[in-house]
Image (cartoon, helix red, strand yellow):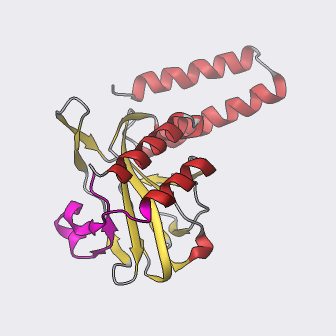
Amino acid sequence: MLLILPDILTNEDLTLARSLLASAPWEDGRSSAGSQARTVKNNLQLPHDCDAAQQITARVLNGLNRSPLFFSAALPLRVFTPRINRYGDDNNHYGNHVDNAIRLKATPEGHTEYVRTDVSCTIFLNEPDEYDGGELTVRDTYGSHSVKLRAGQAVLYPGTSLHEVTPVTRGERLACFFWVQSMVRSDEQRRLLFDLDMNLLKLRERHGECAETTALTGVYHNLLRQWAST
């Protein structure tokens, strides 16, 4: 399932991010790539522990916590610490690749934990008219989908997808990316649960709470109970 999430970051968040990124300590993005991806990756990233990355990451996580759409679609169990990247000049593209299935994440307590990359997410940090190219292109069983969103918006897509970032030929593309280990591993099952949840909301808006919505809510939670691992 490919899904657009509107307004994960506020205008205040974006203003702060752009200010921090103006003097950010960028490094070679290949340092975090797997062996296959490293051969096609050509961008810049912020170190995890720099001030700019930590402040932007905090805003991103707060934005995700405010989004019921993100929770319904991703059903997050663990979220890999968001990373910040830049495409432009000589570091301007990321060729076709599939993300590593497992990532190692540092916890606030100083430990590490594994995150299975069920869901990938990109949040755009600058406006699409500020650069040419730079589309996120995701390929699935239904074909190829190109995504280039307004600043503050996000796209969710299955971590199993073949995808790329096309070359940036003018300006710079700034974005945040991360992965989610879902309580429900199967993309097909997550899609069914999401569709059921969204249609339940519409039924409640139209008819209020009734016997039918109560029964369907039970179906949703019983399916989630059957499919989820926590």
Number of numbered labels in the structure image: 0
The image quarter containing residue 84 is bottom left
Find the magenta span and give its range.
Answer: 21-48
Which residue is the extreme one toward the top? 211
The image quarter containing residue 88 is bottom left
Give the residue displayed 43% in from the left and 56% down from the top: 176
Does residue 33 belong to the magenta stretch? yes
In this picture, residue 227 sits left or right of residue 150: left
Q: Relative to the observer, which residue lies in front, 90 or 206?
A: 90
Give the residue displayed 28% in from the left and 43% down from the top: 116
Q: Position of residue 155 (x, y in %)?
A: 52, 55
Residue 162 appears in the picture as rendered: no
Q: Position of residue 174 (x, y in %)?
A: 46, 65
Q: Relative to the observer, which residue lies in front, 215 or 57?
A: 57
Residue 5 vertical placement versus 106 (above, below) = below
Residue 16 appears in the picture as rendered: yes
The image quarter containing residue 69 is top right
Residue 179 vertical placement versus 71 (above, below) = below
Q: Relative to the observer, which residue lies in front, 220 or 177?
A: 177
Residue 153 vertical placement versus 30 (above, below) = above
Does residue 85 belong to the magenta stretch? no
Q: Position of residue 205 (x, y in %)?
A: 79, 29
Q: Quadrant of the C terminus?
A: top left
In this picture, residue 35 sits left or right of residue 101: left
Q: Position of residue 218 (x, y in %)?
A: 58, 18
Give the residue displayed 32% in from the left and 48% down from the top: 117
Give the residue displayed 62% in from the left and 21% down from the top: 217
Which residue is the extreme one toward the right? 206
